[in-house]
Amino acid sequence: MLKVISRPAVKLVERYLPDPYIFVLLLTVIAAAAAIAVERQTPLAVLRFWGDGFWNLLTFSMQMLLVLVTGFMLASSPPVKRLLRRLAGLARNAGAAIVLVTLVSLAASWINWGFGLVVGALFAKELAKQIRVDYRLLVASAYSGFVVWHGGLAGSVPLTIATEGHFSVEQIGVIGTSETIFSLFNLAIVLALFVAVPLFNRMMLPDEKDSVFIDPSLLEDDDDQRVRISRPAERLENSMTLAWLVGIPGLLFLVDHFVLQGGGLNLNVVNFLFLFLAIVLHRTPRSLLESLQEAIKGGAGIVIQFPFYAGIMAIMVQSGLAETLSQALVSLATETTLPFWTFISAGIVNIFVPSGGGQWAVQAPVMLPAAEALGVDVPRVAMAVAWGDAWTNLLQPFWALPVLGIAGLKAKDIMGFCLVQLLLTGIIIALGLTFL
């Protein structure tokens, strides 16, 4: 049945979904028009919101670019390539490849979202080298595992409200992760998705005549060639000693960070880990730089699009449009249905404000008083925002850009399959938030 449903969804998306750059331009126009029409903002005010906020995601943009680049460099190192090749060997057919890449992506995304995005995409490429399988669905399966990230160890919302001094601490206090990430209802949702998402992906596997395959030779890296050294500078470029003199201290710093300082895993730490592991495992600066040249090709979308999303977020937040949208949906809620409507509103807001922490800052002032007035459990409402934020990432190409850059595909290639997952996972998450 899912195979039948996914076929028109894929064709619909392939035909009508524009390039992510066109998508972000359309969202910019829609957000600006809505701010003028709904919030009665003047065009000049909206223009200023947009322009002033346009560069607010520069740090995050660089972090996301480094997620792609450092992850690619690490995966292209000889030891990691051998590991991925061996793990991919566990899949004996196309169906097994789809299930395996989904499970790996789910597990990695639950640990850390940046880690999950890179590992899933790289593993999909390795599987495509060994198994004849629809490449679009394989990459879509790798991306679909991202849906669990906000219910996992690096979830922005639950970690924010578990931190002393967070912006709403006077209203709700500090809420530990035992009530959010490790609560029974959240773990049940995560477990259900670990079962359902691989199963749904497997059931969408197209027939041979409808499948799109990729030539494995296009995914192969050039074999390392022995470099003839004729200049002193080339000795430095091919010096394993120099690479390790810098790479090993970098890894020792991470040991100190985790073991002695008790530090956690965040995006900067993930990028630091990927980079210095890549430095050590490539063994020579030349090998690392050759990998960098290949990795950077997939980063164009991140560089050009993320500033536009920062501008959209500024319009949504500063005009009051995000708050109005949230209030409109919450007004429909009762004590039983508030988590559901919170989830839906968060999913809609996420299309325009694709940032977990930023979205909580927008929605918390609306959702927390509603939860208090209706007597609803605050941790459940907070996780409803978290899950709504993660859920519509299956439709929003913002987070897919690193995956698409690594895989060499366009958004329209995978979003048809992701659209089916959006509908099915939405039902599971909504039921879990409402009735568990």
Image (cartoon, grey):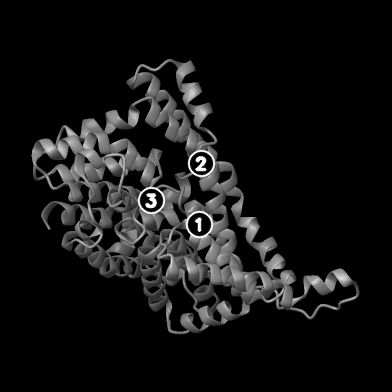
In this rendering, is residue 162 above or below 228?
above
Of the two numbered discs 3 and 1 on the same chain, state the one appearing first in sequence.
1
Of the two numbered discs 3 and 2 on the same chain, state the one appearing first in sequence.
2
- Between disc 2 and disc 1, the foreground one is 1
Q: Which is nearer the eye, 310 or 89?
A: 310
Q: Position of residue 78 (x, y in %)?
A: 62, 79
Q: Which is nearer the eye, 130 or 388?
A: 388
Label 3, label 2: how far apart the Cα atoms are:
18 Å
Residue 268 is marked as: 1
Could you tell me which secondary element the residue under label 3 belongs to?
A: helix
Could you tell me which secondary element the residue under label 1 belongs to?
A: helix
Circles 2 and 1: CB distance less than 8 Å? no
Circles 3 and 1: CB distance less than 8 Å? no
Residue shown at the point (71%, 65%) measured from the top left: 289
Q: Position of residue 30 (x, y in %)?
A: 42, 29
Crowd band around label 1 with a 10 angstrom C-alpha radius: few (<14), some (14–19), many (20+): some
Residue 352 lies left or right of residue 382; in this view the side is: right
Q: Residue flagged by tag 1: what amino acid is it? A: Asn
- Between disc 3 and disc 2, the foreground one is 2
Q: Residue flagged by tag 3: what amino acid is it? A: Asn
Q: Position of residue 410 (x, y in %)?
A: 53, 54
Residue 57 is marked as: 2
Q: Position of residue 246 (x, y in %)?
A: 66, 69
Q: Residue flagged by tag 2: what amino acid is it? A: Leu
